[in-house]
Amino acid sequence: MARGLKAATGIDDIPIIDTHIHLFDTTRPQGAPYKGSPKYVGGVALPSMYAKFARKLGIVGALEIDASPWIEDNLWVLEAIQPETIMVGTVGNLQPEMPEFADYLERYAKNLLFRGIRYGNNWGYNIVAQADNPVFIAGLKLLAQHDLVLDTANPRIDLLQAIIKISDKVPDLRIVIDHLPSFDPTPANQADYDAVLKEIAPRTQIFTKLSEIVHPVMGATTPIVRGLAAHRDRLDTLMGYFGEDRVIFGSDWPQCVGLSEVPDTVALVREYFSTKSHEAAEKYFWRNSVAAYKWVRREPDQPDAG
């Protein structure tokens, strides 16, 4: 620990905003395109189910992140979270390159729980190609005008490079890179990875979630490695590039089931931030999520940034 840095005290009492959970119900007549991790049973993930264990961990609020490319599921999520005050917002699924984007965005942006959209390497979308599409960029400019955020899915080198292009073209757009700790550079792409993070580092409108820290490693002798020791260097690297003002907590429930359950993830990041300042821990667990998402405070125990 650096000289003069006071270690975090009372870190277990810091309220947590979980910026990455998924909701779905495969028992609906139309089903659902996503049902959580292979080890998640039941096919249903609702706010009340999440709240039962999350509140015990000090999680006082959560943001739902896109779990369906079906346009009507934006409304389904909003209706599901409206009566559940632990839910402070949703990041939905709208395609900026589509002709109907502006109309849908105008409609959903009227609901303060709608905090943005996710677009990346999921649902067959191609953010790398779209970063050079003027129509897509025009859509993102509308997103920024509504003061909403862009989450990106499934990090790769080319996705990170596309984010730089997008941030150059839409400099006032807040961007959140999901699950960056899950990207495992290889010797062949390590230099490109370092270079792209170096370019991202000074861009204060780009945040990242320190989420999916424990994750499958392709080709590894031990594909799932638990405990902070195995992941500290990766976290230190990302903290070095993003700083304490642009890192955010996310559990990835219920995709995390069978990999790193929410209590395990909370314990791991609490251990990591216990050696940092109380201010840095507070920023990670909730303050930075306010800056990124401008989520809606709905309960008295949800922190107020003032």
Image: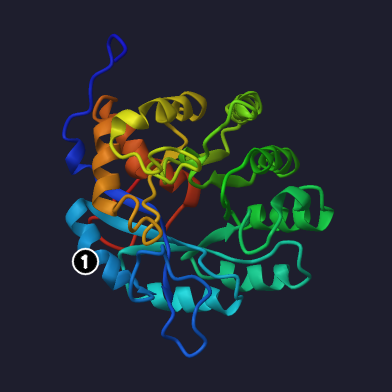
User: Which of the pair 112/69 is nearer the observer?
Assistant: 69
Q: Secondary structure at mark 1?
A: helix
Horizontal side, residue 202 vs residue 277: left or right: right
**Picture coordinates of residue 203 (x, y %)?**
61, 32
Judge by depth and name the residue closer to the eye, 306 or 211.
211
Residue found at the very far top of the displayed protein: 3
Residue 244, given in percent of the width and then of the height, sits at: 41, 30
Question: Is 49 on the left-hand or right-hand side of 234?
Answer: left
Q: Position of residue 36 (x, y in %)?
A: 42, 66
Give the quarter of the figure containing the C terminus.
top left
Answer with left or right where residue 97 lies relative to residue 255.
right
The 10 Å Cα crowd at callout 1, few under 14, some 14 to 19, many 20 or more, is few
Residue located 30% across and 33% down the image: 228
**Can you see residue 302?**
no
Q: Taking 248 as reference, is 6 above or below it?
A: above
Q: Is residue 290 above or below residue 235?
A: below
Where 29 falls versus 11 (above or below)?
below
Residue at screen point 78% across, 70% down = 99
> What's the residue type where badge 1 is placed?
Lys
Determine the residue positioned at 64% across, 28% down. 188
Tell me if residue 201 comes above or below residue 210 in the rendering. Answer: above
Q: What residue is at 54 percent from the left and 46 percent from the top?
A: 176
Give the number of marks.
1
Residue 157: percent from left, percent from top: 65, 38
> What is the quadrant of the N terminus in the image?
top left
Colour pattern of the rendering: rainbow
In the current view of this chain or complex, which residue is farthest to the front?
221
Residue that mark 1 sits on = 52
Q: Nearer the viewer, residue 134 or 171?
A: 134
- State whether residue 221 appears in this view: yes
As drawn, is 100 to the left or to the right of 83? right
Residue that lies at the very extreme toward the bottom in this rendered image:
29
